[in-house]
Amino acid sequence: MNNRWFVFTGVLLGVTAHMTMQTLVATILPAISAQLGDSHLYSWVFTGYLLMSTITVPLFSKLADLYGYKLSFLLGLLLFLLASLLCGLASSLAFLVGARLVQGIGAGMIAPVTMALISMLFPLTKERAKAMSLFAAVQMLSNVLGPILGGVIAATLGWSVAFFMVAPLCVISFVIIYFCQFGPVPGRGETKPRVDYAGAFLLGGAIAAFTQTWSLFEQTGWTFTTTLLLAASVIMIILLVRQEKKHPDPILSQAMLRIPQVSLSSLSALLAGILNFGTIFILPLFSVATFANDPAKSSYFLLPFTVGVSIGAIASGFLLQKISYQSLAQISWCFAIAGFSGIGLAGALTLPVFWSFLFAVSIGCGIGSLMPTFLLPAQNAVKENQQATVSGLIQISRNIGGTIGIPLLTSLLVFTRSLQQEALQYGIVFFTLALLSCLGFAVGSKLKV
């Protein structure tokens, strides 16, 4: 294999492209809608991408384990690149939504393979911990910086440039990965693999129905449509369980889910997703409320949060050489608990803004150092030819957490509106996140190597 860190750089460039696109569009949607119209499709520019990048992960994870990580990564990156160019060239919102759906499929191919590639490139746990900490830093910083970049680009160069800007990253990443030698194709064996397409369809459908239930609940509350979607997700889960029991090579192995490290890691990823995406959502709103409802200052608290994420992600790689996953998880969740509790109190007690900035850094440190604590134990608990599958499971859990987190926080803000005091409203939201962090601490304390 060629220089592993050079290959890893190529992987990170691809990750930067698709993770930035995950949140960047949120801030350019108003500019897109103003130019292209069709407001009834407005939300699908954002949710369509997230939906496709989530529901396709189970199938592509399995195919990657069967046919090889390099091929899967390159195909996903190529599809993502072409779809990004089509997004930038879109002349109607319907065309843009279609291109975003394809872009989401490409992202769904890239995400689980990325983590499996890291596992293959760095088989030694300590080396993998360093690489994973850098990966976590890039992933989370891309999520955080996406909205900021989107706002700047939309205001200066136009929204279409936001889609074109990922092209150079994709091209460089593709060239590096294409010309580098990789290990043998994992897990194919001599027999023809039997892919559980029915299981993949049912799992993807259940995830889609469940996430759309929460998305609609955020907008309309509990209605007949949300009830129908929730019922559909339950029915598909029941059918999925039956399908997985009879298929010789299930898309979602019950044996894998029964491994304590995998189930605990999935729950940790779910909680981390709620905190990560929830924080990115709530901090700009809290910033506007803090600075006399000035929208221009919406990113003020995101900046110290970003600094914290960088510190936490990089530090986690070094800490794992000295302490266990369990200890790092406990430290990470404690930083999150302290940060969310502190920023809630700072707002309620009208403390100087400096304290809120400091607590935002603490939140970032906690969230930034979490990824290795739930991904590495899960990868270490399964076979080499299951790395993409288990990585996909962790990615799905994190995405579902993000899908749940934003409607949850929105609902809390709506329900507490009667208090007529923004400081108390946001205090309740932050204390809720602190309680979820306490749950994360309890889960992380059970992680074993």
Image (tube, rainbow, N blue to C red):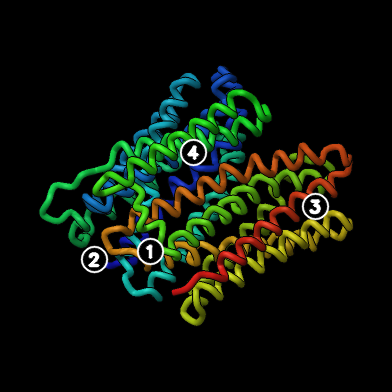
The percent position of residue 80, horizontal first and vertical second, equals 37, 39
4 or 3: tag closer to the N-terminus = 4
Q: Name the residue under label 2.
A: 2
Q: Report the residue at 60% width, 71% height from top.
A: 330
The percent position of residue 266, horizontal first and vertical second, equals 48, 56
2 or 1: tag closer to the N-terminus = 2
Secondary-structure class at tag 1: helix
Which quarter of the figure has residue 421? top right
**Residue 171 in sight in this render:** no
Residue 209, relative to residue 186: is it above or below? above
Q: Mark 3 points at which residue?
A: 427
Residue 426, relative to residue 447: is it above or below? above
Q: Report the residue at 31% width, 36% height from top.
A: 198
Relative horizontal placement of residue 422, taking residue 6 as reference (left or right): right
Mark number displayed over residue 50:
4
Relative horizontal placement of residue 122, taking residue 291 as reference (left or right): left
Give the position of the C terminus as an image quadrant: bottom left
Nearer the observer: mark 3 or 1; the answer is 1
Nearer the observer: mark 4 or 2; the answer is 4
Residue type at tag 1? Gln
Relative horizontal placement of residue 436, taking residue 199 as reference (left or right): right
Residue type at tag 3? Gly
3 or 1: tag closer to the N-terminus = 1
Residue 20, relative to residue 94: is it above or below? below
The percent position of residue 247, horizontal first and vertical second, equals 27, 45
Residue type at tag 2? Asn
Q: Name the residue under label 1.
A: 379
- Would you call the spot at circle 3 few (<14 residues within 10 Å), some (14-19), or many (20 or more)? many
1 or 4: tag closer to the N-terminus = 4
**Residue 421 in sight in this render:** yes
